[in-house]
Image: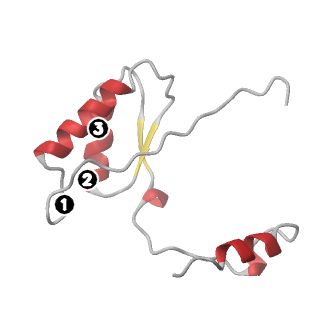
Amino acid sequence: MPGTAARYLYLTRHGEASPDESELTDAGRRQAALLGQRLRGVPLTAIHHGPLARAEQTARLIGEQLDGVPRHRCEAAGDFVPYLPSREELPPEAADAWTGFLEQFST
């Protein structure tokens, strides 16, 4: 569409976590800081992270490398068991296609 600005979504997992997954290891903290350095100059508008400590730590360490990029905790970005919607929850015009596609995956 003419006049539509491009938007990019960058996804990353948290850095290496401790055995109990409660925090980042030294290597995980370094991974996050290095990723922040690599993202300098990328026109990011925000960092959204899940509610777990390892995700918050990763986002904070990335954000420390970026000037003025706000961080937002996002509950929906937490660790969840995969969810398969019922046919009724999908848009009617796409329900058959999506149902067929999603049936390929086990839960």
First in sequence: mark 3 vs mark 1: 1
In the image, residue 77 above or below residue 30: below
Residue under label 2: 54
Q: Is residue 34 above or below residue 94?
A: above
Task: In the displayed orientation, state which residue is furthest to the right.
Answer: 93
| Mark 1 crowdedness (10 Å alpha carbons): few <14, some 14-19, many ≥20 | few
* Residue type pointed to by label 1: Ser
Residue 9 location (% of width, % of height): 55, 39
* Element class at badge 1: loop
The residue that label 1 is drawn on is 22
Q: Earlier in the sequence, mark 2 or mark 1?
A: 1
Where the N terminus falls, by quadrant?
top right
- Per the rendering, the mark at residue 68 is none
Q: CA gap, disc 3 to disc 2?
A: 10 Å
| Disc 2 to disc 1: CB gap under 8 Å | yes
The residue depicted at 74 percent of the width and 70 percent of the height is: 98
Mark number displayed over residue 60: 3
- What amino acid is labelled 3 in the image? Arg
x 27%, y 38%: residue: 32
Drawn side of residue 56 relative to residue 44, left or right: left
In the picture, measured across the screen, residue 44 lies left or right of residue 64, that is right
Residue 34 sits in which quadrant?
Answer: top left
Give the alpha-carbon distance from disc 2 to disc 1, as whole Å. Answer: 6 Å
Name the N-terminal-most of marks 3 and 2: 2
Q: Residue at horizontal 51%, vertical 29%?
A: 45
